[in-house]
Image (cartoon, coloured by chain):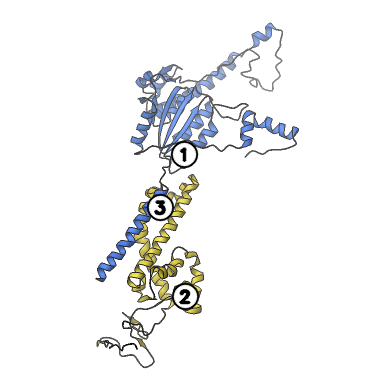
Chain colours: A blue, B yellow
Amino acid sequence: MDIFKSLWALFVILIFTVLSAVVVGGLFSEPYGNVALININGEISIGNGFFSSGAESDKIVSEIKDANSNPYIKALLVEINSPGGSVVATKEIASALKNVNKTKVCWLREIAASGAYWIASACDYIVADNFTITGSIGVSGSYLEFSGLFEKYGVNYVRLVSGKEKDIGTPYRQPTQDELNKIQSILDEIHAAFVKEIAENRNLSVEYISKIADGSIFTGEEAKKLGLVDVIGGKEDAISIIKEKANLTEVEIVEPKEEVNFLDVVSGLLSKEIFNYMLSNQFKLSVEYS
Amino acid sequence: MPRKKKVKPIVIKEDLPPEPSEESFEFILPEGEVGEQNAPFWRRAVAYVIDVFIFYFTFFQIFIAIYLPKVGFNLEEVDLVEQYVAASPDAALRLFVGLVVASFVLLFYFMILEVSFGTTIGKKLMGLRVSGKLNYINTFLRNLTKSVFVFLLPIDIIGIFLYGRRFTESLSKTKVIYHNKLSVEYGVWY
């Protein structure tokens, strides 16, 4: 009898243990987001400019790093709708994505060209619509040059520089051949790095990418044939890939929350420098930004 | 007038130690308790540690195996608790609630065993048991500071040194004694 009584007592404790874990655990059973949505929308830049808009690399890199260190997040869905942008900002975002050790699926929307495609290539899989505009693998350093217009209106450019290349790229005079060669060599260097990154990310040869990296744009369908895109589809297809590759039965997408305070809202309309100037000179206040 | 009961004599085998001298004493406890000797603190402490260890390696493991996945923790990534908490302030709350509920399960463990058997596994191994009216209310009271309010246990223990039993034991009118027959001189119990 004692043995049965002992077993019964232990069984009762076991039932209580299981019930309490199930009931109390059930109170918290709302699922956490397990897929982070990284949105790259607009022109890619470092950010912090006057009326800054578009895809700011600082903010996006921070989101990527947070998603990588968040144990709830099992995969990243990178949504791109961008014509490209600055080289450094693009490279920062692409490098941050490459350092993520979770499944990354890129979903191209209307346009994902130039630097935006560089970023997309850093993902494990690329999903694009068959009419998405992508490609444009190349670098541009073009600018407007107004020397003819100035001459027409009798405006002279007075050149006072400490070094011969100090005003290279200025729109107020015609560039010399040496300056053009110099700028071209910089562009070629960036282009070579761009091609090498794409080739490495897409597991294609540098020679092959060089052939198609003449700045040509492609539709999603053409890009798939060229090996630049993996799947023709939309968001649902991207999510299916995530479920398969990250072994998820359910996908709950979560967007990074940005904490915005009043100063952020106001200074979003102006650059921080002008806002601070206004505060300090008009209202005799100073604001420090962390 | 209470009826006298015949006490069955204890058969001492030849290989047992010699009969105790007059200075030593034995408590023979038939159905009614005729004498109780408080268990020393060290035996009780060891019994408690044994009970906690048994609970930790059995029921607690079952509890966290069910609870943690339900609240979003991956058991394979338990070493990432700090990152879970950093990723979501809610995670700390879930862990805290889990610990509180587990402490109630520990309380239930003590309660069920003491009500059913008058002792727990740890106490039984150390030759101890609980005397007094062992109903659910009393066992609940006496075991509160050993489980849910364990942070009050150091204060509760002071009662052992002052009055021979913990404050919660005084409250529940229970105490921990040696189990059945004990020969103090020889440290034999059964």
Q: Earlier in the sequence, mark 1 or mark 3?
A: 3
* Residue at x 56% of width, y 38% of height: A259
Across and down, in percent, residue A72 comes to 43, 43
Depth check, front residue: B98 or A210 = B98
Q: Are discs 1 and 3 less than 8 Å apart at CB?
A: no
**Percent x, y for residue A187?**
52, 21
In this image, B91 relative to A240: left or right? right
Mark nearest the camera among 1 and 3 is 3
Residues tagged by mark 1 and mark 3 found on one chain of the structure: yes
Instruction: Quickly name the residue at label 2.
Output: B170
Q: Position of residue A258 (x, y in %)?
A: 54, 37
Badge 1: chain ID: A
Q: Is residue B121 visible?
A: no
Q: Residues within 10 Å of mark 2 (few under 14, many from 20)?
A: some
Of the residues shown, which amino acid type is indicated by label 1? Ala
Q: Which mark is residue B13?
A: none
Residue wearing tag 3: A24
Q: Nearer the viewer, residue A203 or A278?
A: A278
**Left or right position of B35 against A51:** left
At horizontal 65% and vertical 22% (from top left) the residue drawn is A166
Q: Is residue A157 visible?
A: yes
Q: Residues within 10 Å of mark 1 (few under 14, many from 20)?
A: many
Residue B126 left/right relative to A59: left
User: What amino acid type should be assigned to the residue bearing mark 2?
Assistant: Ser
Does dot 2 land on a helix, a strand or a loop? helix
**Up/down of A81 relative to A35, above or below:** above
Residue under label 1: A67
